[in-house]
Amino acid sequence: MKTLSFVNNKGGVGKTTSAQNVGVALHRFTGSKVLFIDLDAQASLTRCFGYNNLDFFNADSGSFILNDKTFDEIVVSTDVGDLLPASMGYIVAEDRIKASPLFPFNLKIALDKISHRYDFIIIDCPPSLSTSARIALVASDLYFVPLQAEYLSYEGLRNFLSFASQLSMICPHLALGGVFATRYNPRNRKKLSNDLVKSIKLQLQGQFLETYIRDNVAIPEAQSHHKDIFGYDPDSNGAFDYYKLTREMINKCFVKNLMEQLMRA
Ligand SMILES: Nc1ncnc2c1ncn2[C@@H]1O[C@H](COP(=O)(O)OP(=O)(O)OP(=O)(O)O)[C@@H](O)[C@H]1O
Ligand SMILES: [Mg+2]
């Protein structure tokens, strides 16, 4: 079992979209059992699964982390995996999580009880270095950082990576899975984006993934129809790019793990 977080303190860079579509690709193309965890009170990932009426939930991921409710009371099952949803109430839960003596290990400890049920746990984080990003990183094996090419800033990224790598000191299993560009198209000849991507690639060397996600209208359309990109338009650039990204992540990070699974099957 591997736990992957999609994190960046910058907003609107594609964290939720990538958590959704990489998680779905892992389910569809490797047959993996996936648990999605929404740790953002905006509940964007929860909405991607079609849960718009957040009152529907009598509990959310915060109640699970705080041990107010059991996992089975909260988890929702979907066509592509299980979901621990978020709701507005998560804002209050965050304060209690931070005040708990278990902080920042709260999520890791809670997940240890149920992680054997899944091959991958995918965590969507809010755009900050807050309580949720910390508990997510501490609970993760790998974290992936989406960057929107238009607004790439090496300074901001370096600060974020330094924050995350300091957490590796208290959780040695935590590693950077990779940084990747979203809403990027090198053919657009936007010199600023292209130069920035080139220079960040150079600085990060092997930690910058080769695959980039192009700007593709099918992606927000799929989300507004409460679908993932593969279910909404499997022939779109978005589906192709997220398939390619997931394949690169598997090759770079999990080949050994999946091979072991296949050998056991
Ligand atoms: N490749 C893409 N092409 C077109 N639109 C995209 C693409 N990726 C994401 N979007 C759209 O951009 C918006 C922001 O994406 P997303 O919600 O995934 O970012 P985020 O980093 O999770 O944002 P936040 O920081 O608010 O949580 C969404 O409306 C999404 O549908
Ligand atoms: Mg988001």
Image: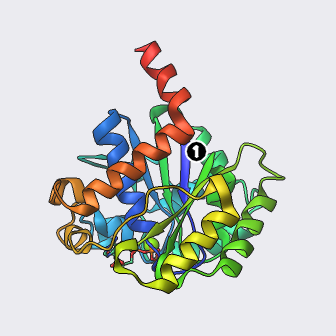
Quadrant of ligand 2 in image: bottom left
* Residue at the spot 35% in from the left edge and 34% down from the top edge: 30
Q: Nearer the viewer, residue 32 or 109?
A: 32
28, above or below 67, in the image: above
Q: Is residue 184 visible?
A: no
Q: Is residue 37 visible?
A: yes
Which quadrant: the C terminus?
top left
Question: Residue 18's image quarter?
Answer: bottom left
Q: Nearer the viewer, residue 133 or 178?
A: 178
Secondary structure beneath label 1: helix
Mark 1 residue type: Leu
56, above or below 69, in the image: below
Which residue reaches farthest top? 264
* Residue at the spot 46% in from the left edge and 45% down from the top edge: 248
Horizontal arrangement in the rendering, residue 138 relative to residue 121 (left or right): right
Horizontal arrangement in the rendering, residue 59 relative to residue 158 (left or right): left
Percent coordinates x, y for residue 160 in the rendering: 69, 72
> Mark 1 highlights which residue?
111
Q: Nearer the viewer, residue 95 or 128?
A: 128
* Residue at the spot 29% in from the left edge and 66% down from the top edge: 48
- Mark count: 1
